[in-house]
Structure formats: structure tokens, C-alpha cells
Amino acid sequence: MKFFITLTIAIIGTFGLGIILSIMIFKLSKEGSKMSVKKRVIITFGLGFIFFIIGGILYFSDYSKAEANALSDMKGSDNVKVFDVPEGYFFDGPGTEDALVFYAGAKVDEKAYSHLILGLSEQGIDCFLISMPLHHAFTNKEVAIKLTGEYRYDNWYLCGHSLGGAMVSFCANKEPQLFNGLFLLGSYPSEKIDDSMKFVSFLGSEDNVVDRKQYEKGKEFWPSKGYEVIINGGNHAGYGDYGEQPGDGLATISKEQQQNTVVEDILKEVKGGI
């Protein structure tokens, strides 16, 4: 919710700035005072729209990049081959029955989550790491549903971080018969998740980014057998390798430890523990 409020304010602010600037120009310009009202209105909104476009470009082009160790994990391993696919990246490991679709957090390079994804793939869960337009999961939120019709697996799971978690929750709610489980990282659903679905919510004890009130409210939408894993010492950015996140708490464990915790608990749900 905080993300959408911030984005709305940014959109209104850039558009409004353009309008204010154009009005000031008219007041200070002799030519402007001679223009018709209609022409002034057209120019005013035109300039506002130009500022809106410039603001949008600046906003969406500024995102958190994957760090060197994450880029290294994108190469795969002896057991896992990584392929480019239209939706992003496919981590093809030794498993043949289970698949997981992962949505990154807002304004985060999806490759930043490769350590976590590689860990799951090594243990028999093939993974699709989705590349979202503009690095925002709402731009293609139903891609997970599409994938279930293009690849043959017995079981499908969803996982997402922050905004990505909210968007995979949308898929789980829209087509619950397609998915066997939902795993949220520093995120929460806004609609009821089917009780047939496996569900784990991961929350770092030092996560200062997630809206705690909304997170607690989101618990009413959890399936009956869903549960929470508090990662002691973990924070919001620790699920990926993309550096620090503004406003986040200071982690007291390594990112690798936080990500390995997620891998282990997802494996317990999918594979019964390995």
C-alpha cells in the first residue's frame, strides 16, 4: 500500500509541477498574457504531461541492481542450468515434478534473488525467475497463471518479495486450482487465500519497510493451515542481493543466512524436508 501511495503522489506531483511552471511562465511573459484561454489551457496541460513523462522515466529507470555474487549465481551450477525464456529466466535443476514462480520486489533487479532461486533448484524445485517490465510486478502480474499452461509439472508454487508477494497472492486468489502453495517474503495478501493451499509468510525481525499494520491485517486472509516464520536478525532487503534499502532495519545476520532459511522452510513444505 505504501508503494502505491508513493507512486500516486509522484505522478500527481510531477504533473502538478508542470502546470505550476506553465502558469508562472504565462504571468511573467508578455506573449503569454496575450494568449487565449483555450491556448493557455492546452499549453498548461501539455507541459504538465511532459513533466509527467520525464518524472516517470526518472522514477522507473532508478532501480536496485543485482550484486556481483548474485550475477555469479545466475550462471547456474553443475546440477542447475539457467536458460533465458520469454518470461525471464528458467532454473532447470534435477527435479521434474515441482515448479516455483518468483516475482521480485518493486524496483529490484530480479537477478538479485538468484542465490535463493538456485538453492531451491538444486533441491529439485525448478524455478522461473520473472523479468517484469519496469521492474514492477503489477505490470505483468498474471504471468504465473500463463506459465502453468505452457510447462508440465505436477505441482506449482508461487513466491514473491514485497510488491511481488502481493502480485503472486493475486494469482493464487484468482486461480487457486492451479497452485499448490504460496510463499511470501516481507509481504501480505489483500484477499482470502484458499484453505487448500500451503502457505508460509516470512518476516525479518528487523524489517522496517513492510507496513506492520497492513501485515497484521493481512493475516485474516491466510489459509487455515498457513503459518509465519520470523527470521531473527533478518530485514527487508535480505531476501535478495541488491544492497541496502532506504528505511530498512539493520540486519544482524548475513543475507545468505536469511535466504538459506527461506530455502529450507520452502523445502519442508514442498518436499517434506530435505
Image (tube, rainbow, N blue to C red):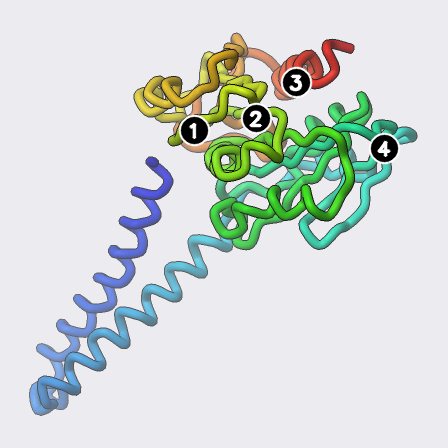
Q: Please, what is the three-letter code of the amino acid marked with disc 4?
A: Val
The residue depicted at 53 percent of the width and 25 percent of the height is 184
Residue tagged 1: 189
The residue depicted at 48 percent of the width and 34 percent of the height is 173
Label 2: which secondary element? strand
The nearer-to-camera label among 4 and 3 is: 3
Q: CA distance from mark 4 to mark 1?
A: 31 Å
Q: CA distance from mark 3 to mark 2?
A: 9 Å
- Give the left or right position of residue 95, taking residue 189 as reference: right
Q: Which of the image's four quarters has the N terminus?
A: top left
Q: Please, what is the three-letter code of the amino acid marked with disc 3?
A: Ile
The residue depicted at 27 percent of the width and 76 percent of the height is 46
The nearer-to-camera label among 3 and 2 is: 2
Q: CA distance from mark 3 to mark 1?
A: 18 Å
Badge number at residue 182 = 2
Indicate which disc, 3 or 2, sits on the residue closer to the N terminus. 2
Q: Residues within 10 Å of mark 3 (few under 14, many from 20)?
A: many
Residue sitting nearer the eye, 161 or 227: 227
Residue 257 is situated, as x and y percent measured from the top left of the image, at 65, 14
Residue tagged 4: 80
Residue 222 is situated, as x and y percent measured from the top left of the image, at 44, 20
Q: Which of the image's four quarters has the C terminus?
A: top right
Q: Please, what is the three-letter code of the amino acid marked with disc 1?
A: Pro
User: In the image, is residue 167 above or below residue 234?
Assistant: below
User: In the image, is residue 122 above or below residue 149?
Assistant: above
Q: Are marks 1 and 2 in contact (CB under 8 Å)?
A: yes
Q: Please, what is the three-letter code of the amino acid marked with disc 2?
A: Leu
Q: Residues within 10 Å of mark 1 (few under 14, many from 20)?
A: many
User: In the image, is residue 43 above or below residue 149?
Assistant: below
